[in-house]
Image (spheres, rainbow, N blue to C red):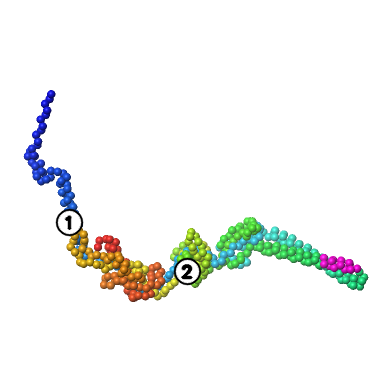
Amino acid sequence: MAELAAPRPPTDPTADPAADVRRRLGLDGRGRWRRRLGALLVLATAAGGIAWAWQRGAAPPTPVRYRTAPVEPGIIAVQVVATGSLQPVRTVEVGAEISGRVVAVAVDANDRVTAGQVMARLDPEPLRTQLEQAEAQLAAARAARQQAKATQDEARLALARARTLTDRGLAAAQGLEQAVAAHARAKAAHASAQAQERLARAKVDQVRTDLEKAEIKAPIDGIVLTRSVEPGNAVAASLQTPVLFTVAEDLRRMRLELAVDEADVGRVATGQAAQFTVDAWPGLTFAGQVSSVRFAPTTSQNVVTYEVQVAVANPELRLRPGMTATAHITAQKVDDALRVPNAALRFTPPQAQAPRMGGPPGPPGLLGTGRPKRQSAGAAAKARPKGPQVWVLEDGAPRPVPVETGVTDGTWTQVTGGPLQAGQAVITGLDSAGADRTAGGPS
């Protein structure tokens, strides 16, 4: 049986001088010296934060610079903006009232025509044949009327003789009765013949009218906008009148049809001036005048609009039917109004510039930087006036000035009352530095 190994004697600490030094300094454990190093870092960070806060509170605040604009008299025009399309004042669709084959077309699109000018012709031969037939029927009816008239005269004479003989007692009463009946029949036959003659004459007149309609003529003076027929085309006018041409009255006068929103139509009235532009002439502005405000609504996708017509002069024929236009209707205009920019009415000084409460900066500490306290939101709301106001600079600080306002065009607002005078400067905003400061940047 082998002998058990003797236990190893403990290591003498004096045998390693470095180990003895770590033991005496308390650094013989890894966790212990890491905790001490972390505590030193926390103390250093806190000391740096306190120093930065003290310097920030003690530094003078960056002055706020304002943008201003002068109060001056000028023109304020309230405008209603709408879009629409240009149309001729009067447009006529020219068609064929009879059926037939087109044998000639005398005009083309963009041609000027005068009232009564022949634009196209239909084949007249079938109508001429119908006219000859109608005239022959009229002649036969006229002859039948004359024959009936002769028969009526004969029956009248026979009736006169029968009455004479009967009165003298030379003829029976039966003969008189037969003569009366024959005269009545002859009179009715003559009336029927007259009616047949009038019917035949009407047929002749109808065919002659159709023969005149074979020449399609311009109904008004104007310009041919469209042409939809060619020589040789067959025209069938049995169910509806086929449209062959579209003629617009003199394009030197046009109308602009605008779709005005229901929220703006109450400010539009007949006689108001309007200006509009079209894409075809981007550098030009055309003038017009409101001629009609329609009562009938138009609803599209739950949007209600009303048609407003504007009379437009087009002496140079630059405007064409169908062009899309964007119009500005001047609903109200003040020529010499004391006005301020709308930005001045919307401006409010930053909260940091409002009256503050609190004493002078105190000593630095972890819970405060020495800055004065800002006014509470409730106090600021109570101090703010209910009516419109603008801000002016007085000794470098903003001061509110109440005003009474009138009309506005979206950029300028009329000042109708208040202490504000022409020539004063009102604050409209902050410059970039002030904006950064009020947004939370360094002060």
Which region of the structure is painted magenta? 172-185
Residue 412 in percent (x, y) is at 38, 70
Mark sitting on residue 266: 2
**Circle 2 residues within 10 Å: few <14, some 14–19, many ≥20:** few
Asked whether residue 215 is drawn in magenta, I would say no
- Measure the alpha-carbon separation of dots 2 and 1: 70 Å
| Residue at the farthest left position | 14
The kind of residue on which mark 1 rests is: Ala
Question: With 406 as the anchor, is 156 left or right in this view?
Answer: right
Q: Quadrant of the C terminus?
A: bottom left
- Helix, strand or loop at mark 1: helix
Instruction: Inspect this view and state whether residue 285 appears.
Output: no
Identify the residue at horizontal 57%, vertical 60% (top origin): 226
| Mark 1 lies on residue | 47
Question: With 222 as the anchor, is 167 left or right in this view?
Answer: right
Upstream in sequence: badge 2 or badge 1: 1
Instruction: Inspect this view and state whether residue 45 appears.
Output: yes
